[in-house]
Amino acid sequence: MTEEVTYADLKFVTLEKLQTKDIQTARAKESCSRSSCWQLAAMVLGVVCLSSVAATGVLAAKFILVCHAVRERDENFTLQKAIMENLSQQLEHLQAQNLNLSETVKQLATSRGYKCTPCPETWLQYGENCYYFSKEWKTWQESKARCSALESRFLKIESKKELVKILFCCSFLFLITCTTSNVV
């Protein structure tokens, strides 16, 4: 048999080399772990930033809508205020005209020898008579008492034609109709 020679290289590892190798492996693992932590943190912060930007956009849109609604409300308020002032001026003007006309009617009534005065404020005049139309429903007795309290009397309508004229003129339905006692 032939003898064969086998060669082998032996390497002896010292304790220092082994420790250095372990430290390098640990550092490599640690650096991998650190970089993945940083990547995870960066990804979480990115999601938070995107969410913040989206929320800011939504809030900005809502703010713009609210500002627009407030502006419209203010414009409507200003318009209504102007209309109200205009109507108040018209009311004052019409009240002054009404007072003026009432005084003129009183002067005409007394200067021409008439023994009547214009109708009270809530009464309506038709011809020589003043009519009171109540807005409340009352019994016959309550109506008579109300007319007495107003120093007036129930109106006795003689014909249907007269009733139609009065109702058409005054544009009210029959409720309580009284005439003043100081009308001739």
Image (tube, rainbow, N blue to C red):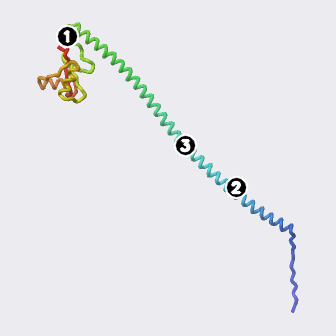
Which residue, given by chain and number where applicable, does mark 3 sit on?
A: 59
Q: Which residue is outermost to the left?
A: 159
Q: Is residue 81 above or below residue 65?
A: above
Mark-to-mark CA distance, 3 and 2? 31 Å
Q: Would residue 64 be found to the left or right of residue 171 on screen? A: right
Q: Amino acid at mark 2?
A: Trp
Q: Answer above or below: position of 83 versus 68.
A: above
Toward which corner of the image does residue 127 lie, by quadrant?
A: top left
Disc 1 residue crowd, few under 14, some 14–19, many 20+, Cα 10 Å = few
Mark 2 is surrounded, within 10 Å at the Cα level, by few (under 14), some (14 to 19) or many (20 or more) other residues, namely few
Residue type of the residue flagged with mark 1 = Lys
Q: Position of residue 64 (x, y in %)?
A: 52, 39
The front one of 84 and 50 is 84
Which is nearer the N-term, disc 2 or disc 1?
Answer: 2
Q: Residue at x 38, y 22 (%)?
A: 88
Q: Quadrant of residue 135?
A: top left
Residue at 86% in and 83% down: 6
Tag 2 secondary structure: helix
Disc 2: which residue:
38
- Classify residue 27 by image quadrant: bottom right
Residue drawn at point x = 47 percent, y = 31 percent = 74
Q: Residues within 10 Å of mark 3 (few under 14, many from 20)?
A: few
User: Residue at coordinates 20% horizontally, 26% vertically from top-left?
Assistant: 142
Above or below 11: residue 108: above
Between tags 3 and 1, which lies in front? 1
The residue type indicated by label 3 comes to: Leu
Disc nearer the start of the sequence (3/1): 3
Residue holding disc 1: 115
Report helix, strand or loop for mark 3.
helix
